[in-house]
């Protein structure tokens, strides 16, 4: 049996692997700015050339990009490959929109369940902040602000799932459906009872996640999304 000598890993490979792991698990999200080179050198206790080489490797892999004079940012490598075909599909076939919404609903049910089981203290803090922002927008009756706060609340739940595929898919669908979410709120706004019911359902999802009950959280998300569907079909 012929064995090859073990070669020690290059420092730049270790740096790249550590940064890549932060991106994969969602600690560094699409659009986030990476620490400056000097800060990375200090945190990682490595040389500046090693940091620069690691960043070049991640850029070559399509995970980060640099903007002159601004810094280095995390790139959402999946977004364009997911949203562009779906956008064309929805444009060419309005019926496909129902399928996209159904997919989003399924993802949000999973996200709520996983968030209840996996959320860290920091995740819960962020979810609480997003829920309070949603409450404030509700009280102001600012439709556009509430649509944005609604998306931010559900995205915080997806982030707390700690499932990188689910996080990226959810973000891609939110980007695709941004105008549609606002349009949905405009329809629901005219139905006062439904509007208040949906707000109460957000509270139920919030409480279920913070109580750490995956089954209750998934059920609350299902009831919420099914109710929205009935509202938009005029069945409530």
Image (spheres, grey):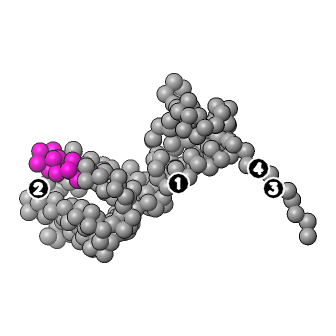
Q: Position of residue 166 (x, y in %)?
A: 44, 61
Pointer 1 local density, CA inside 10 Å: few below 14, some 14–19, many at least 20:
some
Q: Quadrant of the N terminus?
A: bottom right
Q: Main secondary structure of the magenta part?
A: helix
The answer to whether mark 2 and mark 1 are in CB contact below 8 A is no
Whether 99 is drawn above or below 44: the answer is below
Sequence order check, earlier mark of 3 and 1 = 3
Q: Which residue is mark 3?
A: 6
- Please tell me whether mark 4 sits on a helix, a strand or a loop: loop
Question: What is the distance, in whole Å, between disc 4 and disc 2 at their CAs?
Answer: 65 Å
Identify which residue, 163 or 194, lies in the foreground.
Answer: 163
Q: Which residue is mark 2?
A: 190
Pointer 4 local density, CA inside 10 Å: few below 14, some 14–19, many at least 20:
few
Question: What is the distance, in whole Å, between disc 3 and disc 1 at their CAs?
Answer: 27 Å
The answer to whether mark 3 and mark 4 are in CB contact below 8 A is yes
The residue that appears at 11% across and 45% down in the rendered structure is 140
Residue projecting furthest to the left: 192
The residue that appears at 66% across and 33% down in the rendered structure is 47
The residue that appears at 50% across and 38% down in the rendered structure is 34
Q: Is residue 24 left or right of residue 16?
A: left
Question: What is the distance, in whole Å, between disc 2 and disc 1 at their CAs?
Answer: 41 Å
Sequence order check, earlier mark of 2 and 3 = 3
Q: Which residue is mark 1?
A: 24
Q: Which residue is mark 4?
A: 8
Q: Is residue 140 magenta?
A: yes
State the mark number for residue 51: none
Sequence order check, earlier mark of 4 and 2 = 4
Pointer 2 local density, CA inside 10 Å: few below 14, some 14–19, many at least 20:
few
Q: Position of residue 235 (x, y in %)?
A: 16, 71
- Confirm whether residue 99 shows in the render: no
- Please tell me whether mark 1 sits on a helix, a strand or a loop: helix
């Amino acid at each position: 049996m012929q064995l090859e000598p073990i070669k020690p890993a290059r420092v730049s490979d270790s740096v790249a692997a550590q940064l890549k792991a932060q991106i994969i698990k969602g600690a560094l999200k699409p659009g986030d700015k990476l620490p400056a080179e000097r800060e990375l050198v200090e945190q990682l206790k490595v040389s500046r050339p090693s940091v620069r080489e690691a960043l070049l490797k991640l850029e070559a892999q399509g995970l980060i990009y640099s903007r002159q004079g601004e810094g280095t940012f995390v790139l959402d490598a999946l977004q364009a490959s997911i949203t562009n075909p779906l956008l064309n599909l929805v444009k060419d076939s309005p019926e496909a929109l129902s399928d996209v919404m159904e997919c989003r609903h399924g993802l949000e049910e999973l996200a709520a369940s996983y968030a209840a089981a996996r959320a860290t203290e920091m995740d819960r803090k962020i979810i609480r902040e997003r829920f309070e922002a949603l409450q404030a927008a509700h009280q102001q009756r600012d439709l556009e602000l509430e649509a944005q706060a609604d998306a931010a609340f559900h995205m915080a739940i997806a982030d707390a799932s700690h499932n990188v595929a689910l996080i990226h898919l959810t973000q891609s669908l939110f980007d695709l459906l941004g105008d549609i979410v606002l349009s949905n709120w405009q329809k629901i706004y005219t139905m006062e009872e439904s509007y208040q019911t949906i707000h109460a359902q957000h509270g139920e999802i919030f409480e279920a996640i913070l109580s750490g009950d995956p089954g209750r959280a998934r059920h609350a998300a299902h009831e919420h999304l099914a109710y929205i569907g009935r509202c938009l079909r005029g069945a409530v």
